Image (cartoon, rainbow, N blue to C red):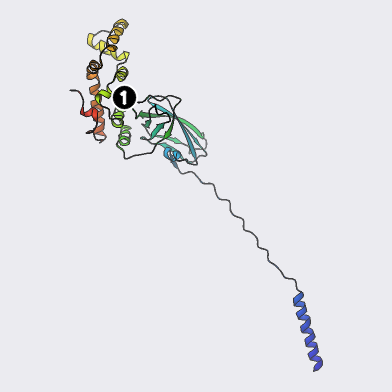
Amino acid sequence: MKLTILVLLSLASVMVLGCSSTKEHTVESVATPTPTPEPPKPPTEITIHDAAAQHEFVTIRATGQDLDFVNLTVTAKEHGFDFTIPAGTLLINGSRDNQNMMVARTVVLSFTDPSQPLQQETKLEVYCVNLFKHVPTSSNTFSVGSYQPQSELVKLVQCLENSSEEKDIRQQSVWIMSDNPTWEQYIKRDRIDMIFSRDTFRELLKQSSGQEPTEEQLDAVIAEYRQMPDDELRELVKPYVTPQIARSRKLFEECNVPTDDRNLFQNLPE
């Protein structure tokens, strides 16, 4: 019996020693790789106002040309969207002495097809919105102004997009809204010079005499006209300009734009 107990104690000590000498096993953690995020895709449509807010997919550059057009260059980083310039977009001239412009007709440039170039150029038809400033030149650059679709000016311009009226009358209508000139401000000598070109005098003389005037006759009439006092000049252009202003008033009415506070509509000569 005593021997048996000694054997059991011996075996127990061996087991304890064996357990204490066993190497510990550690489990190494394996890092899970972080998936690379997909690059963002452009929306299906980007407007010029998005681009003005430093859109990540497109950049723009707008430069002056004349009273009727602004040159626009659009550079995309990738394909997959249409680029829209809506009518009524305000383009602010970098020169304070030159006119700001407003887009007259909506233009859409497509960057959806991978075969299309990532840089596209277009001419935007525009209206001047500063009657008393200088016409833009090729050295002028433009930034995009805030878009105010509820303003009467933008509503008028967007309505005129569907008008078949002559561009001169549509531009005059925009000035009546943007600058609200009086008769005296609008019919100034420099503007009369624009209205009464040499060809205008030629046509007026032909109507009055029934014959094509000679160049000498034309020179004599133009020289006499240039010596007229401002009041006489306004009387001279009254039959020509009054119907044009009436055509602008009609456009306002067709576009549901108020006319009550527009000076030229209220102070038309009789």
Tell me: 44 left or right of 163: right
The residue sitting at the bottom extreme is 1
Q: Tell me which residue sits at (79%, 81%) in the image.
A: 14
Res. 178 image quadrant: top left
x%, y% of residue 262? 24, 31
Residue situated in front as seen by the camera: 17 or 247: 17
The answer to which of 130 and 217 lies nearer the viewer is 130
Q: Quadrant of residue 31?
A: bottom right
Q: Position of residue 42 (x, y in %)?
A: 48, 43
Q: Secondary structure at mark 1?
A: helix
> Residue 47, percent across and down?
42, 39
User: Which residue is painted at 31% across and 17% down in the image?
Assistant: 193
- Give the residue drawn at x 44%, y 35%: 109
Residue beneath disc 1: 168
- Residue 213's image quarter? top left
* x and y, in percent, of residue 133 in the image: 36, 26
Task: Classify residue 69 as left or right of residue 216.
Answer: right
> Which quadrant, please, contains the C terminus?
top left
- Seen from the viewer's position, the closer of residues 237 and 88 is 237
Q: How many marks?
A: 1
Crowd rating for badge 1 (residues with CA inside 10 Å; few <14, some 14–19, many 20+): few
Q: Quadrant of the N terminus?
A: bottom right
The amino acid beneath tag 1 is: Asp
- In the rendered structure, the answer to whether residue 55 lies left or right of residue 155 reads right
- Outermost residue, right direction? 3
